[in-house]
Image: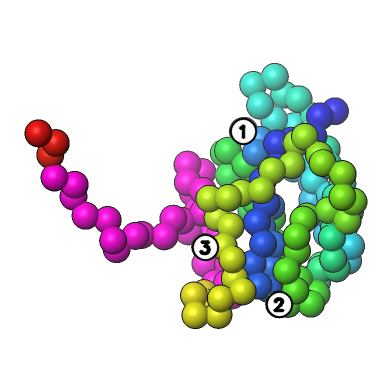
Amino acid sequence: MHPATTKWYDRRDSVFIEFCVADSKDVKVNFDKTKCGFSCVGGTDNVRHEILIDLFEAIDENECKHRRTDRSVLFYLRKAQPGTPWPRLTKEKERLTWLKVDFNNWKDWADDSDEENYDQFPDLMHNMDGDDDMPEDEDSDDEKMPDLE
């Protein structure tokens, strides 16, 4: 058994975890107050992946959700104490080779002026299809660059 490559990011009320396993089958998830578990068979070699994560803080296991796509399995963990930042995903401080921070989705949410509504997670999950990850923010500052001479 191998741990899946895993990315995570923190939000004010929740934590998102993405287990990067293509073509996953036999997906099993488990949400507990201080732990979450994931297992599946996936990839071209049908390798068995299994991970049990001892979380940094408690979660509301009744409000947690997951969604399987063709590329990955995404977890939405609702924090038991919203507004508390998680400096890491796991309780242990050791570096895990399979766990990475998802810097593409990471935001410094200490600045309240850029607050977003993450109660729309069920809509995000419903709108996801097998070929897309979480929707990207459009940058209104993007303008066509002039041709170089």
Q: Under tag 1, what secondary structure?
A: loop
Which SS type dominates the magenta stretch?
loop
Residue type indicated by callout 2 = Gly
CA gap, disc 1 to disc 2?
33 Å
Q: Residues within 10 Å of mark 1 (few under 14, many from 20)?
A: some
Residue type indicated by callout 1 = Ala
Which numbered marker is on residue 22? 1
Residue type indicated by callout 3 = Leu
Residues in magenta, as a range:
118-146
139 inside magenta stretch: yes
Q: Is residue 92 visible?
A: yes
Q: Under tag 3, what secondary structure?
A: helix
50 inside magenta stretch: no
Which comes before the other along the chain, label 3 or label 1?
Answer: 1
- Quarter where residue 106 is shown: bottom right
Residue under label 3, please give it.
124
Q: Residue at the far front: name it.
A: 149
Q: Are marks 1 and 2 in contact (CB under 8 Å)?
A: no
Residue under label 2, please give it.
83
Q: Is residue 86 above or below residue 43?
A: below
| Horizontal side, residue 11 vs residue 92: left or right | left
Single out the mark in the foreground, 2 or 3.
2
Q: Residues within 10 Å of mark 3 (few under 14, many from 20)?
A: few
